[in-house]
Image (tube, rainbow, N blue to C red):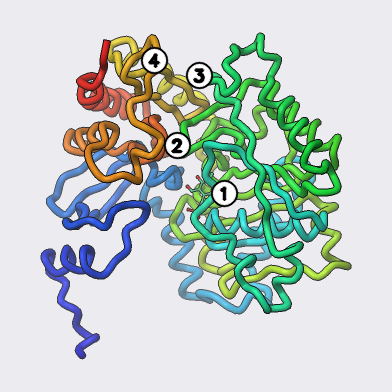
Amino acid sequence: MTLTHVPDASEDLDRYEVEHLFHSWSFQPGVAPPRVVAAKGVRFTTEDGRERLDFSSCFVSHNLGHQDPRVVAAIQKQAGELASFAPSMSTRPRAVLARMLAQVTPGDLDRSFITLGGAEANEAAIKIAHQYTGRRKILSRYRTYHGGSAAAMSLSAGDSRSWAQVLGGTEIVRVPQPYCYRCPSGQEYPGCNLFCASYVDEVIELEGGGDQVAAMILEPVVGANGVIVPPPEYLPRIRRICDKHGVLLIADEVMTGFGRTGKWFAVDHWDVVPDLMTLAKGLTGAYVPLGAAVARKEIGDRFKEQFFSHGATYAGHALGCAAANAVIPIYEEDGLIENSATLGAYLLESARDLAERHPCVGDVRGLGLFVGLELVKNRKHKVPLTAPDAKIRPGANPKLEVGKKLFDLGMIAMAANPSNVLALAPPLIVTAAEIDEGMALLDKALVVADAYVEE
Ligand SMILES: Cc1ncc(COP(=O)(O)O)c(C=O)c1O
């Protein structure tokens, strides 16, 4: 065995990709994906030397764009001083980040558990909700994504630390989205009087109200499942319903947090303060993996008397915290949140222009630099371009074909999500000229989906 020299010529790397890796959410490929060797700002370069636009911000995480020298320097400095230490001890970056998160998040969100990513942040939030309320049920909505982990603590049977998971874990109750383009109750806003929210009220009541239901978790603006922006009254109404029953509200801002929707956090659009907020992605701009579950003061303070049954070796990792401490002030200093609002409006307008030329576009919606185009086979009858299970089935997938065409033309967007929505989420540093450039490429790529349109 010669581990000191693993051959790393291009063909070797391709072979390792195919033979030795699990690739996320896919049939394992027979051919390695193109290799990225460099990235700068809103562009990245593959091994063949070709540069392309990144209109996905790498799953909506690189909010600052790629290789910002200020962040790289902060990571290098921290690595030189203290790369990491056990979470039972304090480190300067962790303490500073905890304070910064208390300052930047809305209302009295105050105490953070710092994780390695979004899924772990949601796991932490759900566990806090269970432990704080002593209840087991969590309301979640269809068409949502909260992370890839398997509610790991519920599986840790026999370890006394898992006993705090009430009666063995989470019992999930699902409710619909405020998905107006395809209203689940077949109504039209505003005539519907937000039936989707009233229904949540009824479900909580029928599930045992505040005796049984610990929390409701939601993405304030749905990400991977279709850039669903709720009507303005929806979230305040949900907040009131949760309060009425004494149910906690968890806002998963993993994708929407840190300026993506044109405010620091998406809930800020509607002045709603959740009881717990989960963060990742834009927290470090993806330079180092990191997430956080932030709890309101009253919830956090409870755990002075009650054992906090959660933890991880890398919780509050110094490198990640140092990256976040460099990244968060940049949102303010560089005016990135304003840029997201202003150029987001421009991106939305440009996407609407495209929709006029492409019959495959059934709906365009978005908030800030987060815009989705819902693709259909028939606009009038809203016939979906692909079935809900298209992503997990083998064979042709027209939406992935659009993504492939876009890549060939010189850009990536979020095309591989399970929904029929092609999402555009460039880094928040994007300029109007770069948006024009990207939309010109998208104009050409949408022709692929137009070919599937049936009159
Ligand atoms: C809303 C939301 N929550 C949670 C996650 C999971 O985050 P991670 O991939 O960092 O575990 C994602 C990932 O895309 C997300 O979009």
State yes or no: discs 3 and 4 in contact (Cβ < 8 Å): no
Residue under the image location 68 percent in, 74 percent down = 90
Q: Residue furthest bottom?
A: 1
Out of 128 and 378, give the one closest to the viewer: 378
Residue 328, numbered label = 1
Q: Element type at marker 2?
A: loop
> Viewer-nearest of labels 3 and 4?
3
- Describe residue 266's horizontal placement relative to residue 372 as left or right: right
- Name the residue carrying label 3: 181
- Name the residue carrying label 2: 428
Quadrant, the N terminus: bottom left
Residue neighbourhood size for the residue with mark 4, other residues' Cα within 10 Å, grouped as few (<14), some (14–19), many (≥20): some
- Name the residue carrying label 4: 352
Mark earlier in primary sequence (1, 2): 1
> Viewer-nearest of labels 2 and 3?
3
Quote the CA–CA distance across marks 4 and 1.
Answer: 32 Å
Residue 219, numbered label = none
Residue type pointed to by label 4 = Arg
Quote the CA–CA distance across marks 3 and 1.
Answer: 35 Å
Residue type pointed to by label 2 = Leu
Quote the CA–CA distance across marks 2 and 4.
Answer: 20 Å
Residue neighbourhood size for the residue with mark 3, other residues' Cα within 10 Å, grouped as few (<14), some (14–19), many (≥20): some
